[in-house]
Image (cartoon, helix red, strand yellow):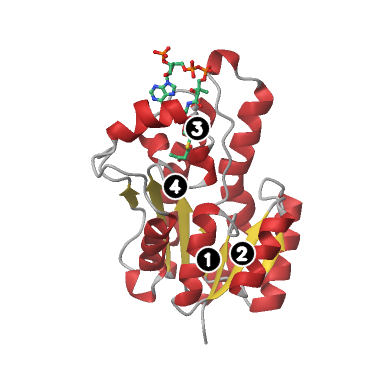
């Protein structure tokens, strides 16, 4: 029986590449999305991957959404907590709403998306939980106090959850992408990207979403059971933790 994988934020950007790669690797994939119906339906038509609309920052919506995934595909074996947003602004100009939107979507979602699947994983004695963090949670980034705080939080969450579930066949790992060619990075002012970011990437280019997806497929494998609590950087050499 194919294992079931759920990718949050799985219809666009890095998440879409992850969904596609997991499908190619033989998983039954469900892709979550929050708001962009047009992109989600296009993704579904192109890939045949079913899409599930719910807001990862809302516990009730996640519980309902997860039930729909389980009814359609079966219990979730692989959870990829990928959904994330930015609200970049200097902290001295940041509103609490800008702070809170990012923390709810990027960090509260660790609870809201993982809590509904963890008991089943423990009962079945297998699970792969993969969290998509960021280079900017490791090194900091001006304009991103909210995002860096949330993304750094994923690492502590992963280590604690990995310890709690290590004896139950469940691994919990983090991938920390650098600057990847997606809409999120395209939202960075072009001059800033050209003069302040690209020159700092030793491989000399933005990463590709498929390069992150490849790391997810590696960590999701049954054979990756000895890797847990780890953070894998994929950032073109920009930051070596
Ligand atoms: N690195 C270094 N310096 C930067 C910078 C960066 N990424 N972004 C801005 N600066 C510099 C500016 O060049 C400017 O310097 P000078 O005064 O010497 O010209 C100074 O910081 C202030 O910048 P702005 O004048 O642009 O100020 P602002 O208030 O209008 O905007 C900002 C500030 C919100 C930080 C904006 O510049 C911005 O959005 N920067 C990009 C931040 C960023 O890198 N976000 C990552 C998004 S991608 C992502 O999050 C995915 C991931 O996980 C990697």
- Is disc 1 placed on a helix, strand or loop? helix
> Looking at the rendered structure, which numbered label has been put on residue 31?
2
- Is disc 4 placed on a helix, strand or loop? loop
Establish whether ligand 1 lies closer than 8 Å to the Cβ of label 3.
yes
Q: Nearer the viewer, mark 4 or mark 1?
A: 4
Q: Residue at x 66, y 23 (%)?
A: 96
Q: Earlier in the sequence, mark 2 or mark 4?
A: 2
The residue nearer to you, when weighing 237 against 203, is 203
Marks 4,1: beta carbons within 8 A: no
Give the labeled residue for mark 1.
19
Give the labeled residue for mark 3.
188
Q: Residue at x 45, y 45 (%)?
A: 133
Q: Nearer the viewer, mark 3 or mark 2?
A: 3
Q: Residue at x 42, y 68 (%)?
A: 220
Q: Nearer the viewer, mark 3 or mark 1?
A: 3
Residue 174 x/y as whole percent: 40, 52
Mark 3 vs mark 2, CA separation in Å: 26 Å
Q: Is residue 1 above or below residue 23?
A: below
Q: Residue at x 44, y 69 (%)?
A: 168
Q: Earlier in the sequence, mark 3 or mark 4?
A: 4
**For mark 2, does the 10 Å Cα neighbourhood hold few (<14), some (14 to 19), or many (20 or more) residues?**
many
Q: Quadrant of the C terminus?
A: top left
- Is disc 2 placed on a helix, strand or loop? strand
Give the labeled residue for mark 4.
181
């Amino acid at each position: 029986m194919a294992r079931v994988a759920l990718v949050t934020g799985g219809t666009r950007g890095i998440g879409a590449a992850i969904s596609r790669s997991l499908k190619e690797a033989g998983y039954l994939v469900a892709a979550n999305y929050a708001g962009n119906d047009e992109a989600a339906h296009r993704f579904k038509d192109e890939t045949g991957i079913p899409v599930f609309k719910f807001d990862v920052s809302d516990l009730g919506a996640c519980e309902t959404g997860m039930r729909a995934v389980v009814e359609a595909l079966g219990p979730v074996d692989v959870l990829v907590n990928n959904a994330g947003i930015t609200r970049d602004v200097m902290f001295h100009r940041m509103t609490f709403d800008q702070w809170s939107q990012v923390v709810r979507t990027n960090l509260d979602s660790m609870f809201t998306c993982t809590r509904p699947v963890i008991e089943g994983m423990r009962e079945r004695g297998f699970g792969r939980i993969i969290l998509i963090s960021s280079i900017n949670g490791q090194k900091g980034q001006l304009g991103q106090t909210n995002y860096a705080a949330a993304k750094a939080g994923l690492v502590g969450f992963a280590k604690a959850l990995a310890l709690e579930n290590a004896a139950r066949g469940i691994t919990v790992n983090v991938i920390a992408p650098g600057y990847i060619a997606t809409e999120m990075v395209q939202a960075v002012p072009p001059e800033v990207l050209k003069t302040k970011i690209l020159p700092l990437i030793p491989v000399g280019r933005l990463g590709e979403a498929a390069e992150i997806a490849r790391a997810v497929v590696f960590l999701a494998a049954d054979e990756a059971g000895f890797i847990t609590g780890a953070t894998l950087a994929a950032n073109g050499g920009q930051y070596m933790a």
